[in-house]
Amino acid sequence: MEKTRAILVDITKCIGCQSCEQACKQVHGFPMETEARLSPTALTVIEEHGDKFVRRMCMHCEDPACASACLVGALRKTATGPVTYDGAKCIGCRYCVVACPFSVPRYEWSKLAPLVKKCDMCAARQSAGQLPACVEACPTGASIVGWRDEILEEAERRILGDAKYVKHIYGSQEAGGTSVFFLSDVAFEKLGFAAAPQQPMPVLTANALGDVPTVVMVGGAVLSGIYWITQRRVAVADEERRER
């Protein structure tokens, strides 16, 4: 099996300089204005939580709910780690927006032919042997990239070697595991991190997003999925009203 790439973000090292934001915007040709939240023109942002700076970006789940929910295969998990998006296939159903437990995909409401926008971990740059733009731009080493197993080992080494860290690698279990990990010296729930279920999200969302329920298979996972999706639709509707 081909090894996959992953990013580690160490919140204790982030100084809030927003170099990652600006590098991402430059690579994608987006307007360089600072944005407070993820948007179609801000695929990674720095949020302030007291004296802590927290990056937001796509988590690139190992078993991504967005790809599972996509009816036309516009989103897919690549063999090397990034979850990529093909706008030529997208039909604008926005199921990916509802399915994502981390509220990452953004819809271009202001365009006549809108697309979904999300970080793709600079898949093209990585294929060419380059670093993701956000990682390359970070002046403090708060973001690093490498092979997923080695990144997890580095995260574990830091936790074991320094008592300041919360004893959890965010992303190691959430949504069945991701390709973006966070370390922190403050409880993750205090920094606005989603309390995502630990099982892969397609287990919860696949049947719940379908229009025709499979009665024979109705059980705890499916019922949990229906409840989770119902709550997500309410949250996404509120989010979309604010974006419009």
Image: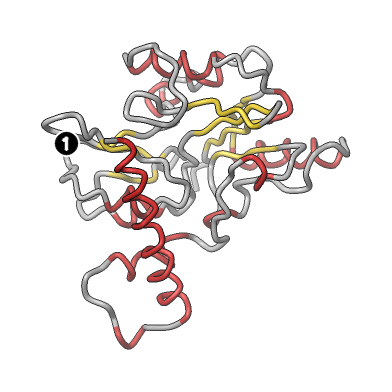
The quarter holding residue 28 reads top left
Judge from the rendering whether residue 21 lies leftward or rightward of residue 75; answer left or right: right
* Residue 183, percent from left and from top: 70, 37
* Residue 97, percent from left and from top: 33, 48
Q: Residue furthest left?
A: 112
Q: Residue at x 31, y 36 (%)?
A: 243
* Residue 126, percent from left and from top: 45, 25
**In terms of depth relative to the viewer, which is nearer, 38 or 180?**
38
Residue ID for mark 1: 88
Secondary structure type for disc 1: loop
The quarter holding residue 182 reads top right
Q: Residue at x 64, y 42 (%)?
A: 149
* Residue 64, percent from left and from top: 42, 51
Judge from the rendering whether residue 224 lies leftward or rightward of residue 156; answer left or right: left
Residue 102 in the image: above or below residue 242 = below
Q: Residue at x 44, y 30 (%)?
A: 37
* Amino acid type for the residue under numbered disc 1: Ala
- Colour treatment of the image: secondary structure
Q: Residue furthest bottom?
A: 216
Residue 81 in the image: above or below residue 141 = below
Q: Quadrant of the C terminus?
A: top left
Q: Residues within 10 Å of mark 1 (few under 14, many from 20)?
A: few
Q: Residue at x 61, y 54 (%)?
A: 173
Judge from the rendering whether residue 100 lies leftward or rightward of residue 12; answer left or right: left
Judge from the rendering whether residue 100 lies leftward or rightward of residue 4; answer left or right: left
